[in-house]
Image (cartoon, rainbow, N blue to C red):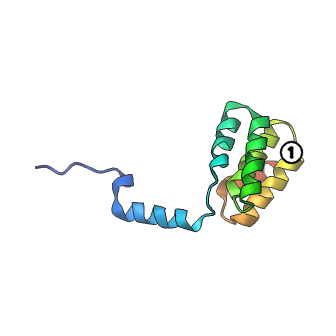
Amino acid sequence: MKETIRTIGDNPAVVKKRDEGQALRAPRPPEARGGAAYVRKGAADLAIDDCGTAIQLNSGFAWAYFHRGTAYLSKGKPDLAIADFEIALLLEPNHVCAMGQLAREG
């Protein structure tokens, strides 16, 4: 039987590295799942509220700060956005998305 080509996601070495990396991250609270989706849908107020809840539950969750920052940007509040991007970078110094936003806004 001919072996089929597997996707990168099926590679055991890649799966192991991904799982190890996820284990090192701060746990993602269930409330944080909507923040990014709200930002994508243009519902900035809901994103800000959702990310605020996630931050209350886990103040080390850099992505919540990042997504709240993008929501602040969409509402025309760059000072609040920059503050959140800076916090995201303090929590995760290699947070490429936060670096990119700061480079554009800062």
Extreme left residue here? 1
The three-letter amino acid code for the residue at tag 1 is Pro
* Mark 1 crowd level (few <14, some 14–19, many ≥20, 10 Å Cα): some
Q: Nearer the viewer, residue 40 or 60?
A: 60
Picture layout, residue 29 above or below residue 45? below
- Foreground pick, 44 / 4: 44
Residue visible at 34% across and 58% down in the picture: 11
Percent coordinates x, y for residue 10 in the rendering: 34, 54
**Helix, strand or loop for disc 1:** helix
Name the one closer to the observer, 55 or 7. 55
Instruction: Judge whether 15 appears above or below 67 on screen.
Output: below
Residue of label 1: 78
Residue at image coords 10%, 49%: 1
Query: Residue 6 in the image: x percent, y percent?
Result: 29, 51
Q: Residue at x 68, y 53 (%)?
A: 63
Asked if residue 50 lies left or right of residue 105, the reply is: left
Q: Is residue 64 visible?
A: yes
Query: Can residue 99 be seen in this snapshot?
Result: no
Q: Position of residue 102 (x, y in %)?
A: 78, 53
In the displayed structure, 52 sits above or below 15; it is above
